Image (cartoon, rainbow, N blue to C red):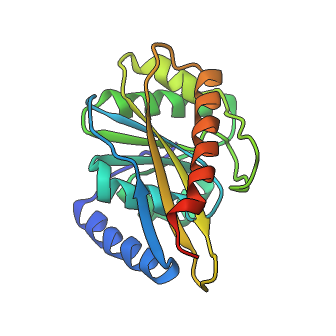
Amino acid sequence: MIEARHSTWRSMVFDVFVNSLLRWHFREIKIVGEYIPRSPSTLLIANHFSWWDGFFAWYLNQKLIHRRIYVMMLEEQLKQRPFFARVGAFGIRPGRREILTALNYSAGVLRTPGNLLVIFPQGSIQSQHSPYLNFQKGVEEILRQTGIAPDILFCAVLTDYYSFCKPSLTFHLRPFQVPHSDTRSLEAAFNEHLALARNMQDKLWIH
């Protein structure tokens, strides 16, 4: 496993890069909902539908959450892009033992005040139009090992073109609070949030 090794100056450069990239490729960006920190650390659960998703998480953290970000990616991909390890990415290899190591590492991230852990619990990319997203069990194991109750923030990311050549980008946010955050309850609640976000989406943009 490749651990994240944050670099302040690299993060500053990456922030300029991400903001420029999103401004170039998206016509407008909206954040719907708010986040008020209540716990020392934050778990961001988002849908995984594109190559952009890690950049989206970075943007949202810089604009709203303001915590030290950690994002899981495949070790093979991280070796090809080692710069990402200096801005919060950590790499894992397929395999039971390696996955357990990554889950332990993720729990340690959440036990540390001021951290943000980004999870895409689908486990693979699915269309943003998929009617239902199935969660892997890793997120439940991370929360069990953490031993504290971090903030859990749902983020449904949606894009639309309408009559423009560039798409709009919307982050729909919702805090999630339940006594026991098992996989099925997280899955059901996130899918409910995603459905509400889709219904709201058409009201937010002028065609």
Residue at 41% across, 57% down: 31
Q: Position of residue 42 (x, y in %)?
A: 36, 36
Image location (x, y in percent) of residue 110? 37, 31
Q: Is residue 71 left or right of residue 87?
A: right
Q: Quadrant of residue 114?
A: top left
Q: Is residue 65 left or right of residue 132?
A: left
**Residue at image x 34%, y 46%?**
34
Measured along the vertical axis of the image, is residue 202 above or below residue 4?
Answer: below
Is residue 58 in sight in this rendering?
A: no
Nearest the viewer among 205 and 191 is 205
Compared to residue 153, the image places residue 53 above or below, namely: below
Which residue sits at x=64%, y=61%? 50
In the rendered view of the protein, which quadrant contains the C terminus? Answer: bottom right
Tell me residue 169's x, y (percent).
51, 66
Q: Nearer the viewer, residue 203 or 51?
A: 203
Relative to 122, say whether 181 is above or below.
above
Instruction: State the residue lying farthest toward the bottom.
Output: 165
Q: Does 199 appear above or below 56?
A: above
What is the tally of numbered marks visible in this picture?
0
